[in-house]
Image (cartoon, rainbow, N blue to C red):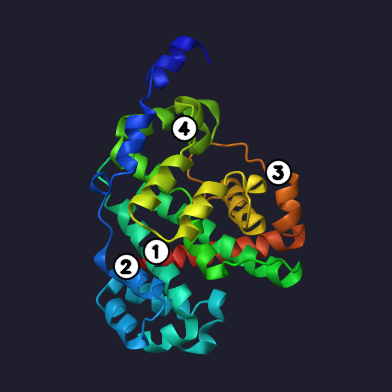
């Protein structure tokens, strides 16, 4: 691409430090749903009672619907569990799974309320985020069972972190619509992902913005660790295999109808990442069909 075209697609300079300061300020970020924050806070303190959680969940129809759907989904054992009440769902799923569901609900609420760039597609973003979350959960569950992988994170925790993995992109569309549109235009013109495009437009990774927002919201360290390491998991100091699950899930999302972009992107994956957590060729189609179905159900319920 010539310099003149580059100037047409992207701004000549980006004050990344000023942008980062906005992501570090809770006042600059969208408000999170109070019920989801209350639920996460109660669970993270470690002494939440079922009745307390039930009361918080029932105060929010979106969380209630998602919790009941999760308790009866294939990923949690299927409809034979017959968890028809919120209390039963809490006992069946466990508190970490409940927290993960709350996170998925507020992320979808966040993007659907975005009043930034008209080029941002909140439905596509929500579907992409949920797809990567569900697939990350499946992959970690599989490798801990079949490859003796050890992780301090549960599959449900990785689900929530996977849902958040592109948080910076979603917030950028609202906080700096012009930069988002410049990155999107450059990505479409060059067949790149939005993350790759942002790096070339600004010289910095959008993951830095994701981490700043997570810290401003005081989200659990798990989410910060995943946002820091999921793009280059093999360089991480810990939880390499779990981070590889998110990285590989993003790769498969790019190759299916759950990519963030409408244009063709040449998705690549490190061979070692695929060796660590990749699906066998015989399983790919069935697993993607399962995850796609769950994604459709949960996005519709939110």
Distance between the Cα atoms at labels 1 and 2? 7 Å
Distance between the Cα atoms at labels 4 and 1? 25 Å
Q: Secondary structure at mark 4?
A: helix
User: Mark 4 highlights which residue?
Assistant: 198
The percent position of residue 289, horizontal first and vertical second, equals 60, 63
Relative to 147, does residue 216 appear above or below in the rendering? above
Q: Residues within 10 Å of mark 4 (few under 14, many from 20)?
A: many
The percent position of residue 48, horizontal first and vertical second, equals 36, 81
Q: Nearer the viewer, residue 39 or 7?
A: 39
Relative to 198, does residue 267 appear above or below in the rendering? below
User: Mark 1 highlights which residue?
Assistant: 103
Contact between marks 1 and 2 (CB within 8 A): the answer is: yes
Residue 117 seen in the figure: no
Q: Earlier in the sequence, mark 3 or mark 4?
A: 4
Distance between the Cα atoms at labels 3 and 1? 29 Å
Q: Secondary structure at mark 1?
A: helix
User: Mark 3 highlights which residue?
Assistant: 270
Q: Earlier in the sequence, mark 2 or mark 4?
A: 2
Dividing the picture into quarters, in which one does residue 179 lie?
Answer: top left
Relative to 101, does residue 209 appear above or below in the rendering? above
Contact between marks 4 and 1 (CB within 8 A): the answer is: no
Q: Earlier in the sequence, mark 3 or mark 1?
A: 1
Q: Nearer the viewer, residue 201 or 28?
A: 28
Q: Secondary structure at mark 2?
A: helix
Residue 36, disc: 2
């Amino acid at each position: 691409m010539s310099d003149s075209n580059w100037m047409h697609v992207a701004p000549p300079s980006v004050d990344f430090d000023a942008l980062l300061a906005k992501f570090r300020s809770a006042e600059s970020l969208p408000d999170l749903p109070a019920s989801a924050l209350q639920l996460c806070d109660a669970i993270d303190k470690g002494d939440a009672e079922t009745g307390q959680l039930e009361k918080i969940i029932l105060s929010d129809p979106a969380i209630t619907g998602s919790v009941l759907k999760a308790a009866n989904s294939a990923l949690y054992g299927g409809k034979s569990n017959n968890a028809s009440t919120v209390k039963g769902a809490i006992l069946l799923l466990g508190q970490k799974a409940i927290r993960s569901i709350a996170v998925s609900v507020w992320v979808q609420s966040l993007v659907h309320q975005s009043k930034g760039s008209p080029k941002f597609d909140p439905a596509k973003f929500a579907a992409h985020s949920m797809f990567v979350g569900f697939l990350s959960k499946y992959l970690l569950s599989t490798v801990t069972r079949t490859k003796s992988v050890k992780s301090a994170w549960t599959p449900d925790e990785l689900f929530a972190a996977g849902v958040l993995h592109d948080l910076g992109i979603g917030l950028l569309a609202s906080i700096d619509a012009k930069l988002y549109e410049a990155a999107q235009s450059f990505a479409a013109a060059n067949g790149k992902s939005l993350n790759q495009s942002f790096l070339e437009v600004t010289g910095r990774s959008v993951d830095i913005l994701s981490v700043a927002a997570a810290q401003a919201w005081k989200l659990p360290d798990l989410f910060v660790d995943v946002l820091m390491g999921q793009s280059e998991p093999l360089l991480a100091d810990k939880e390499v295999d779990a981070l590889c699950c998110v990285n590989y899930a993003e790769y498969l999302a790019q190759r299916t109808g759950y990519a963030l972009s409408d244009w063709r992107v040449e998705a690549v994956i490190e061979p070692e990442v695929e060796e660590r957590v990749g699906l066998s060729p015989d399983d790919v189609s069935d697993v993607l069909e399962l995850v796609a179905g769950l994604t459709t159900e949960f996005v519709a319920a939110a």
